[in-house]
Image (spheres, coloured by chain):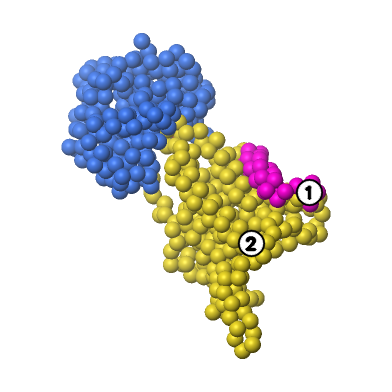
Chain colours: A blue, B yellow
Amino acid sequence: MSLLKIDNIHVYYGAIHAIKGVSFEVNEGEIVTLIGANGAGKSTTLNTIAGLIRPRSGMVSFEGKPLHKVTTAKTVSHGMALCPEGRRIFQQMTVKENLEMGGYSRPAKEIPASIEEMFVRFPRLREREKQIAGTLSGGEQQMLAMARALMSKPKLLMLDEPSMGLAPILVEQIFEIIKELHAAGVTILLVEQNAQMALSIADRAYVLETGTVSMSGNADDLLHNDAVRKAYLGS
Amino acid sequence: MITFLTYLINGLNIGSVYAVIALGYTMVYGVAKMLNFAHGDVIMVGAFLAYCVCAYLGLHPIIAVLGAVIGCTILGILIERLAYKPLRQATSLAVLITAIGMSYFLQNMAQLIWGSDTKSFPSIIQGDAIVLFKTVQDGVTKTLTLSPINILTMASCFIIMIALTLFINKTKMGKAMRCVSEDKGAAELMGINVNLTISVTFAIGSALAAVAGILLCASNYAPLSPTTGSLPGIKAFTAAVFGGIGSIPGAMLGGILLGLIENLGKAYVSSELADAFVFGILIVVLLVKPTGLLGKKIHEKV
Ligand SMILES: Nc1ncnc2c1ncn2[C@@H]1O[C@H](COP(=O)(O)OP(=O)(O)O)[C@@H](O)[C@H]1O
Ligand SMILES: [Mg+2]
């Protein structure tokens, strides 16, 4: 069943036509990845789904309900969470406060148990509970950003370049966690520059090129597609 | 010694009021990223509202304070909704001009309603001054006193500062304000209603301005007129920058220090040059620490 459906969206930044009629869908239980070069429009697409940017035309629907006109806060309560590019954790708040903010849309009495779940999944965060988030290492900040997004108990987790700027060993860890989350039943929409890694864990993939979908299909097929290998996998 | 202590108490007194006004500037700056130059005039409106309730309706000062606080809270929300919200995407220069325009609009409205002559503000608290200290030197008696309005002013300002600190650090709305002030987009992604948070910030800042306005006029710091709020508004803005604009503890520290420096400057430098002295110190502090005393470095976004 299709959980998220994007239908022919057009997004502009002033006069810049950043997304030119993109359509795709994410089914419940899938990992879908959007790959593409820098500036292709991946972040713009995720930000539009999250309601941070309004499409000029086209539809975004989630569980069959149109969402392109509601506020970001509403998309969160409908069950979507975006872990944004560059992490954007609250640098001046503690690790625990960041997690609490992630659960902002939920009843206060459920929050401690969810924080405990996050500490089990991300043990490093428990050690750093009272630390100011801005002092965490890059890998820890990424984990905090993911944990914070998960605090809203999303049905759909959108991740924008979770491996950006991390050492290879940390990238491996992040992808392990994504697989675990998927196994735990979270549907995932993953944007990555690291196309090799993304395609290897995804079910399906869409290739974005200057604001349009240039290719799509099973992740495995794309991983072995010559054009994709040339453009995005460097071989 | 007694002279010094008297100036110290006066400094703390006016400084605590500056601090409360500065909190309004700094909170709005933090959350809405704008300098609300009409804030000083909300002080004036608050004082006039209290004046009306006392002088025209003859009600108890506590009702006057309540009325002024409620009136200014609504005024603050309206100012934000009608004047600033439509300019969210506009350049900061356009917003600044709008704020200056709003400031003159409020002054002119006050002039239209209440006239431009000064009014004598009713005393909101009665009682004798407490004599803290008394000396006789060369046949001259000197006393250090604390008047009821001094006590009321300092007590209410310190209670406000403590309550606001708790609110910002402990409550859900207070934390939402900190999130919005750090990263509006990320705050939205948490499900925080940014518009509501901004409204609440203006509401709180304006409620505090009402209290400050009443305390200022009741202390006879300034007679009540449509321009009553201008100078304290600018001083409190200075205090907010001095302490680090956007920082709550910074606004409190900046306000109190400004009051102390101003009064000690009056005592030991020159009463005419006290303001120049205050701004001189401000400039030196900003040269050494451009973010203000407790201002945080703006983190570079990745
Ligand atoms: N805030 C913005 N203002 C103007 N143009 C933007 C803005 N953000 C992105 N763009 C432009 O939109 C296009 C898509 O950007 P983006 O979605 O960030 O790409 P990606 O995430 O795939 O690297 C790029 O050409 C970029 O320059
Ligand atoms: Mg991007």
- Please state which amino acid type lies under the numbered disc 1: Gly
Q: Which chain carries label 2?
A: B
Quickly name the residue at label 2: B148
Instruction: Give B21 or B90, whichever is nearer the viewer.
Output: B21
Secondary element type, mark 2: helix
Q: How crowded is mark 1: few (under 14 residues within 10 Å), some or many (20 or more)?
A: few
**Residue that sits furthest to the top in the current view:** A1
Pointer 2 residue Cβ closer than 8 Å to ligand 1 = no
| Residue A166 percent location from the top left of the image | 24, 40
* Residue at (51, 61) in percent of width and height: B254
Q: In this view, does A22 lie to the left or right of B227?
A: left
In the rendered structure, which amino acid carries the disc numbered 2?
Pro
Where residue A36 appears, as percent x and y from the top left, is 32, 29
Q: Residue at x 80, y 57 (%)?
A: B116
Q: How many labels does the image show?
A: 2
Magenta span of residues: B55-83
Q: Does the rendering let one see residue B124? A: yes
Q: On screen, B143 above or below A153?
A: below
Is the residue at mark 2 from the same chain as the one at mark 1? yes
Query: Residue shown at 38%/44% (left/top)?
Result: A93
Residue under label 1, please give it: B58
